[in-house]
Amino acid sequence: MIINQPFTITNSVTVSDGGTKYIIGNDKNDNKFTICIYQFVFKENFNSKRIPGRLYFNDLLIDIRSDIEKNIVEALEKCIVKSDLTEISFSSSLSKIKDVTNLAEANDIGPGFADSYLIKLILDYIKSDLYIKNSEKFK
C-alpha cells in the first residue's frame, strides 16, 4: 500500500459506540481515504469486521508498528485540515489545542480545530502503550 502524502483532512467523525473515530480526506493524488480507530470500550460490540482498538485505512487492518502505520502517522502529523471556512496545518494547530479536553472546546477555537483535536487523539493513541495492550486483549 502506498501512502501518498500530503493528506488533506476534510472531515472527522466520532461515533457514540464507545469511541470509534473516523478521519476522512484525500491524498496528493486526490484519492479519497478513511482512517478509523475502532472503539475499544465495549468488548461485546466486537464483531468479525473490526477488531476493537485497531487502526484501519480504507477498511484494511493496519499491522501495529508496521511501515504502513508509520507512513500513516507521518502523513497525519503533516496533514492539512480543510473546512469550508479555513485551511490549517495540523502541526500549527497543536499549540492551540494542547490544553483542550474535548471536541466542543476544540470547535470553539475555530473552524478545523475539532478535526485537529480528533487527529491528535488518534495519533496519541496509536503511539501509546494502551494501543499495544488493546491489540493483545482483542485477538
Image (tube, rainbow, N blue to C red):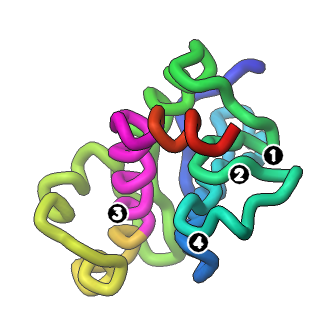
At label 3, which amino acid type do we have? Tyr
Residue at image point 56% right, 34% down: 136
Q: In the rendering, at what x and y percent does residue 135 appear?
A: 57, 37
- Please tell me the numbered disc located at residue 82: none
At label 4, which amino acid type do we have? Val
| Pointer 2 residue | 34
Q: Quadrant of residue 20?
A: bottom right
Q: Quadrant of residue 121?
A: bottom left
**Helix or strand or loop: what does disc 1 sit on?**
loop
Q: 78 or 22: which is nearer to us?
A: 22
Q: Nearer the N terminus, badge 1 or badge 4? A: 4
**Helix or strand or loop: what does disc 3 sit on?**
helix
- Tell me which segment is drawn in magenta: 115-131
- Please tell me the numbered disc located at residue 13: 4
| Pointer 3 residue | 117
Q: Does the magenta stretch include residue 119?
A: yes
Q: Nearer the N terminus, badge 1 or badge 2? A: 2
For marks 2 and 3, give the CA distance.
Answer: 17 Å
Q: Nearer the N terminus, badge 2 or badge 3? A: 2
Query: In this view of the protein, can residue 51 be seen by the observer?
Result: yes
For marks 1 and 3, give the CA distance.
Answer: 22 Å
Task: Classify residue 111 as left or right of residue 3.
Answer: left
Q: 27 or 114: which is nearer to us?
A: 114
Q: Nearer the N terminus, badge 4 or badge 2? A: 4
For marks 1 and 2, give the CA distance.
Answer: 8 Å
Q: Nearer the N terminus, badge 1 or badge 3? A: 1
